[in-house]
Image (cartoon, rainbow, N blue to C red):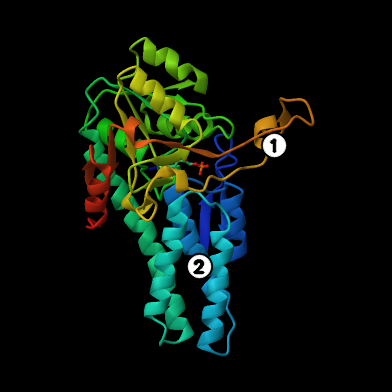
Amino acid sequence: MSFRTIEWLDDAVVMIDQTRLPGEEVYNTYTDFQSVAEAIKGMIIRGAPAIGVAAAMGVALGARAIIADTHESFFRQLDNVCDVLGRTRPTAVNLFWGLERMKRVAEANRSKSFDKIREALKKEAILIEQEDLTICRNIGKWGATLIPEGATVLTHCNAGGLATAGYGTALGVIRAAHEAGKKINVFADETRPWLQGARLTAWELMKEGIAATLISDNMAGFFMSRGEITCCVVGADRIAANGDTANKIGTYSVAVLAKENNIPFYVAAPVSTLDLSLSDGSKIPIEERPASEVTHIRGVAIAPEGIRVRNPAFDVTPARYITAIITENGIVTGDYRSGLRKVASFSCT
Ligand code: MRU
């Protein structure tokens, strides 16, 4: 890939600034956990797996800065680092998965020196980033088997290299089908209000030389009803035990339209996006973001001042609309409860 979403470089975290794409390709360097937390909150980095990696790297940065006399004090401060990072975005479970994984590593090294604990945390954060690349490639391999030659694939939001450590989940499936030599065309929903589809997915696909067509969100039904869409592939921010899936706002509408038009609707996500502690999607916390994202587009007002606004960033697609969930450990369809438990129980990295 011709860009890096996030990497650990010279004891700092470097991220491509997604708020400035596609106009400018700028890389920001972060040396403290507070600014990583701000970057997650401000969507400089976004997408469930990518914010999991960012949170883990944030913990590693936070640990480096801790000054403590005792292990008790060190661990108390580390908990605070995790709390600050955990308060950034509530829906994508990968954030909490990343933080938990870092806490477990710290705990496993509790008896060691502070420097050894710091080193173990840095290694783990880098490992999470590297594993994510392998995971996405495996999601791609499984998912590509579902994409027919000549398909037109509709996707919503950005579940690409920018939303992961690279390669992507939904776009990973598309990339893998393209790499396998299938001639495919992608319809990218623009994804209001933040325009992940127009700004990020369109950018990634064009960079990769994959045929892409940008549509506004309200056009999906039109193209589906005309038989122009073969299948839909989207990412996920949190998948409950019964397969209900939280993803970018508007995903639910796409799924309902797909069912109405007999079009397969696939969700592509790593096992780290599963939250089997939640029995169904009604328990998934949904982030509400600032009104300005709806009233303005890139700083320009498009609505009268003072209008009341709602801005939920995600919605939940009930499992009955999902044809299959593609993970790095295989494709789950039918009985999601047992199928998701099965794919969650083994590791392929
Ligand atoms: O608000 P965002 O841009 O972080 O939302 C991202 C999405 O909804 C993605 O589809 C999801 O995180 C999957 S990314 C592989």
**Label located before the other in sequence (1 or 2):** 2
Q: Residue 243, percent across and down? A: 33, 42
Work out whether residue 218 or residue 33 is closer to the camera in this orientation and state it: 218
Residue found at the very far bottom of the displayed protein: 69
The answer to whether one can see residue 163 in this image is: yes
Q: Is 79 placed left or right of 238 in the picture? A: right
Above or below residue 138? Residue 185 is above
Q: Secondary structure at mark 1?
A: helix
Q: Which of the 4 image quarters holds residue 333?
A: top left
Q: Gap in Å between the C-alphas at discs 1 and 2?
A: 30 Å
Mark 1 — residue?
Answer: 292
Residue found at the very far top of the displayed protein: 226
Q: Residue shown at 22%/22% (left/top)?
A: 149
Q: Residue 76, percent across and down? A: 55, 79
Work out whether residue 294 or residue 15 is closer to the camera in this orientation and state it: 294
Select label 1 or label 2 by which is in front.
1
The answer to whether one can see residue 328 in this image is: no
Q: Is 86 placed left or right of 220 in the picture? A: right
- The quadrant the N terminus occupies is top left
Q: Residue 167, percent across and down? A: 36, 43
Q: Amino acid at mark 2?
A: Val
Disc 2 residue crowd, few under 14, some 14–19, many 20+, Cα 10 Å: many
For disc 2, does the CB lie below 8 Å from ligand 1? no
Q: How many marks?
A: 2
Q: Which of the 4 image quarters holds residue 23?
A: top right
Work out whether residue 267 or residue 163 is closer to the camera in this orientation and state it: 267
Q: Secondary structure at mark 2?
A: helix
Q: Residue 66, percent across and down? A: 57, 78
Mark 2 — residue?
Answer: 59
Disc 1 residue crowd, few under 14, some 14–19, many 20+, Cα 10 Å: some
Q: Residue shown at 54%/60% (left/top)?
A: 86
Residue found at the very far right of the displayed protein: 305
